[in-house]
């Protein structure tokens, strides 16, 4: 049985152009309902527009690209992952995180994402207690 969390959509460049120009509101609702968007044969500006639509709806975006045509999308996203490879290093240089191959993506998200979350949580608690202690000393 499928739930709404399992919804994904696949769109190509021609269909995305029509959706962005004529049915932007309906397309935005579809993008918000779905968990994953797979875009094939789209222009770099269309990729960036899709990321911008999701960011305007207060969603966190992750963009993964492996070539120079993905640079605008990676820079537009909250978190950009560039994969260095056959198509050059443009995406890897523009990204927040750079990996060598697609197979390293799982480890980056699961392992290093958890480490980053734990470090952020520790730092926020540390800052709170440090500020609390400084205030008590002054009082």
Image (spheres, rainbow, N blue to C red):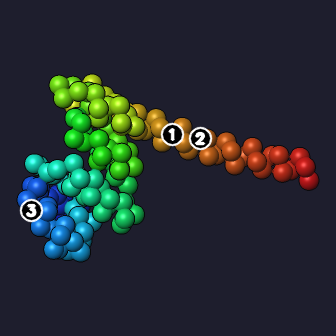
- Splitting the image into 4 quarters, where does residue 20 fall? bottom left
Q: CA distance from mark 1 to mark 3?
A: 41 Å
The residue lying at 90 percent from left, 49 percent from top is 138
Report the side of 74 relative to 86 (left or right). Answer: right
Image quadrant where one finds the N terminus: bottom left
Proximity of marks 2 and 3: CB atoms separated by less than 8 Å: no
Mark seen at residue 122: 2
Q: Secondary structure at mark 2?
A: helix
Q: Secondary structure at mark 1?
A: helix
Proximity of marks 2 and 1: CB atoms separated by less than 8 Å: yes
1 vs 3, front mark: 3
Viewer-side residue, 108 vs 73: 73
The residue lying at 36 percent from left, 36 percent from top is 94
Where does label 3 land, which residue? Answer: 15
Q: Is residue 1 visible?
A: no
Q: CA distance from mark 2 to mark 3?
A: 45 Å
Q: Position of residue 60 (x, y in %)?
A: 38, 55
2 vs 3, front mark: 3
Mark seen at residue 118: 1
Q: CA distance from mark 2 to mark 1?
A: 6 Å
Mark seen at residue 130: none
What is the number of callouts on the image?
3
């Amino acid at each position: 049985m499928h739930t709404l969390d399992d919804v994904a959509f696949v769109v190509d460049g021609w269909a995305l152009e029509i959706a962005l120009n004529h049915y932007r509101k309906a397309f935005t609702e579809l993008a918000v309902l779905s968990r994953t968007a797979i875009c094939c044969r789209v222009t770099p500006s269309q990729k960036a527009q899709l990321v911008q639509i999701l960011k305007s709806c207060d969603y966190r975006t992750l963009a993964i690209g492996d070539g120079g045509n993905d640079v605008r999308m990676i820079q537009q996203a909250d978190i950009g992952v560039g994969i260095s490879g056959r198509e050059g290093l443009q995406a890897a240089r523009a990204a927040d995180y750079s990996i060598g191959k697609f197979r390293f993506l799982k480890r980056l998200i699961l392992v290093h994402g958890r480490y980053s979350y734990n470090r952020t949580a520790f730092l926020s608690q540390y800052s709170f207690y440090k500020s609390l202690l400084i205030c008590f000393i002054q009082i």
